[in-house]
Image (spheres, rainbow, N blue to C red):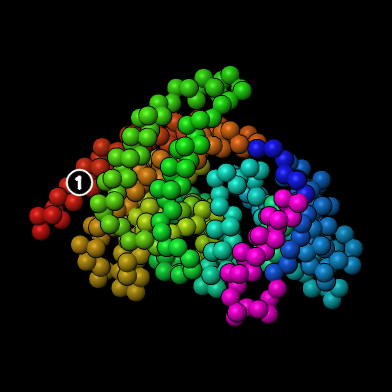
Amino acid sequence: MGSRTESENEREIWKAMEVAEGARGDNSSSHVLQSSSLTLDTSLSLPDLTPPLIELCKDLFKKWSRLDDSSFSVETVSGGITNLLLKVSVKEEDGNEVPVTVRLYGPNTDYVINRERELQAIKYLSAAGFGAKLLGVFQNGMVQSFINARTLIPQDMREPKLAAEIAKQLRKFHRVDIPGSKEPQLWNDIFKFYENASILHFDDIEKRKKYETILFKEVYNEVVEIKELTDLLNAPVVFAHNDLLSGNLMLNDDEEKLYIIDFEYGSYSYRGYDIGNHFNEYAGYDCDYSLYPSKDEQYHFFRHYLQPDKPHEVSDKDIEALYVESNTYMLVSHLFWALWALIQAKMSPIDFDYLGYFFLRYDEFKRRKEKACSLARSYLSGQESR
């Protein structure tokens, strides 16, 4: 957990370049990925962060290296829990203004995010029309093309027209082929989180007291039980986004174009997990789970996911299977983010009540478990008798 040496930092940046370059394939050899060994201090305020950010842009993009600092303007786009998004507008020598997005990774997020996996996927997702183009990498972040759109808010996602478009885009996303292992990573990640989360030590007395009330043996048994049940569903394995909250959806209202962004948690996983996790995000930032979509709202989403061109021709059998799948994996989503929160409570310098978030997600899991599990079991016994 100590600080890294300069040579370790250099190895890290070369590795990031190799992964991203390797993912480019022969078709895009004309575009060379730029790289810099600079690191930006994420704890700085925007005015203090601006000069080193300008230095980074000049280091990455040689055509900007001679520009005066006054040619650069910086603004915050959004600050997620695991990264900070900044827009840098650059006035080039010919008078053209070029915007780029700089994504700064949150401190210690390597404990919960596989950056190598993310860089590997970005190229293929970008080629399929998802997210922004990767332009450069640096020690603790990346530079991407700027998307001219607004970030959705949670209530946008349940608007029928938008819900249908999200479903349609998610279907396309799930069909992107990312080379390498197609082995689902969900349970590997959950068990790894569990292992790390169950042996933490907090110096803060209040945090320690809260943490010591967690019954880890119970949590482990819940994980094992729900894994055994979801395994019986034989859910299709797809390349999943795994974090499809409103903050990772953008809309250009004029063009009516929807963008799925930020693939930090992307991996091969189960179709129902990605959808169930998305439905949990209807709760918004206040985690009001009474906003979880109704059966009618879910069916609307499923129809447009399964057959975007002919949504009303989807069979009842296919809809029922996806309904059961999504609402069982919805439980898994609560377990994933609950365990994730415990690691963040220890590792993240961000002022957020991660321990409280663990209890919020775990309690919601327990509240919904019986109904969701009995739905899955009755569906499975019906399948057996057919």
Q: Residues within 10 Å of mark 1 (few under 14, many from 20)?
A: some
On screen, residue 366 above or below 236: above
Q: Is residue 183 left or right of residue 137?
A: left
Q: Image height check: is 86 above or below 4?
A: below
Residue 107 in which image quadrant: top right
Type of secondary structure dominating the magenta stretch: helix
Residue 249 location (% of width, % of height) = 52, 58
Q: Is residue 21 above or below residue 271?
A: below
Decide whether residue 264 is among the magenta residues. Answer: no
Three-letter amino acid code at the position of disc 1: Arg
Residue at the (77%, 57%) spot, across then down: 37
Does the stretch in magenta take in 11? yes
Q: What percent of the width, then of the height, locates residue 183?
A: 41, 59
**Location of residue 181 in the rendering, given as x and y in whole percent from the top left corner:** 45, 63
Bounds of the magenta span? 7-32
The residue at the point 43 percent across, 44 percent down is 190
Residue drawn at x 61%, y 23% is 203
Residue nearer the viewer, 236 or 3: 3
* Left or right, 196 with reference to 219: right
From the top left corner, tell me how far across and down residue 344 is, in percent.
56, 37
Left or right of 254, for residue 236: left
Q: Which residue is mark 1?
A: 377
Residue lying at 34% horizontally and 74% vertically, measured from the top left: 309
